[in-house]
Amino acid sequence: MELRRLSGMNPSAPLMPGLAHAAVSDVGMRRTNNQDSYFAPRSLSPDRFRSRGALFVVADGMGAHAAGELASKMAADGVSHLYEKYRELSPADALHKAVIDTNSEIHRRGEADPDLHQMGTTCSSLLLLPEGAVVAHVGDSRVYRLRGGVLEQLTFDHSLVWEMKASSPNISAEYAASLPKNVITRSLGPNAKVQVDREGPFPLEPGDKFLLCSDGLSGQIEDSEIGAALATLPLSEAVHFLVDLANLRGGPDNVTIVAVEVSHELLAGVGARGSVASDKAATPAPLLGWIGLVAFVLAAVASAAFGQYAIGIVFAVAGIVCGVFLAWTYSRKTESDAPAAPQRPFGRGPHVRTPREAPKAFLDKMQRLIDELAEAVTESGWQVDWKRFEDFREQAQASLAKNDHGSALRAYARGVSFLLQEIRQQQNKGDDSAVF
């Protein structure tokens, strides 16, 4: 097995105070090109988050030649670009329209070129807003939320297996297992029109972690294992470890993961109606306007009563100006006044709730995995930093002795990722023998 270098990655990074993310996209063990794409913002300001939120997209392309790769890139780029373009719409409606219009563009491109005919892609989008998380979804790429030790799948897989189970809840497990798992029933591109599922808004809480992924991950890693890794490891380590684990289990497909974490710092800065709190007190402009209007009207009336008509006219004009100011204040529609999330709920998610795997059960798997991996590396005669690798194993054993399962899992995961990174470095230097 050749461990290829990850084709795209970024470390865990704060987009703004209280909001961090990490992303990785890997070609896997059996594919020659990566047909996955993703979008994540590089940075955000509090004002930007208040008005339009934070958008994340994962797309998994399908099609011969380079068609799938192009379709997924058009999805990730198109949805993010059009979402920004449709600023006259509410965030949820803008996202929905962005996905629909991106489908039209992918379809048009596919119809215009025989080599791209019927190209398609999944598209799962997560929009975090002050008032909650909104999902727009087509295909079987997934969006999860981890909260309180439970991993929730917010999206419904548009796949033959899921559609059959939904339409016939009483089908046997044996029959469901016999259905092809890679057949999807909905995607962007093949058809001129597409039905987009919307879910949410799901209110945010401190500690919430979201994960978007292509089926290269969910097809190899159980939900309970995803939950355990996401709960135990920092974001950047979690996404890389999950990719490594998928590859060690065969890596039959491209793997793309985007993980996002919400902390108390973010939500503490969000005021009423989704507005971000400011250090400056808001100026009571309408109140001052009303005070001025009443004062100028009374002054104009008093001046007229005493025969001071010229002065009365001045006060009357000033009162008119105050009235115009008040009318403008109350009629003005600014971007910050727009609701940050829809008030009506979409969809029926979460569709699956899975308690993260018990630390001890996952640790038993990890212990066997790391022993098998060390044995394979030893038999291959690779030159790796065995001392550092053994340090990770010893840390895990010491943590187990203290019943500190979280620390033990972190040590094992870091040992696996370290060893695989050592192998990749040899391959990058041109050592073709680095295969097992």
Image: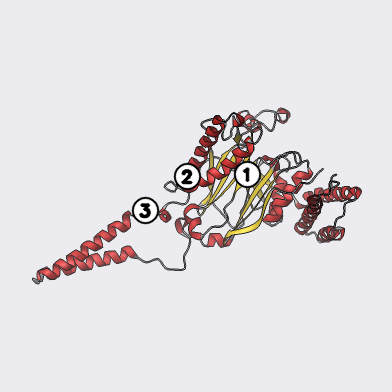
- The kind of secondary structure element at disc 1 is strand
The disc, 1 or 3, on the residue closer to the chain's N-terminal end is: 1
**Alpha-carbon neighbours of circle 3 within 10 Å: few (<14), some, or many (≥20)?**
few
Residue 16 lies, in percent from the top left, at: 56, 60
Nearer-the-camera pick, 367 or 423:
423
In this view, the mark in front (1 or 2): 1
Query: What residue would you read off at disc 3?
Result: 333
The disc, 1 or 2, on the residue closer to the chain's N-terminal end is: 1
- The kind of secondary structure element at disc 3 is loop
Query: What residue would you read off at disc 2?
Result: 94
Q: Is residue 412 left or right of residue 156?
A: right
Residue 143 lies, in percent from the top left, at: 61, 44
Q: Residue furthest left?
A: 307
Instruction: Give how far apart the Cα atoms at labels 1 and 3 are.
Output: 36 Å
Query: What residue would you read off at disc 1?
Result: 37
Determine contact: label 2, label 3, CB under 8 Å. no
**Of the residues shown, which amino acid type is indicated by label 1?**
Ser
Q: Is residue 350 above or below residue 384?
A: above
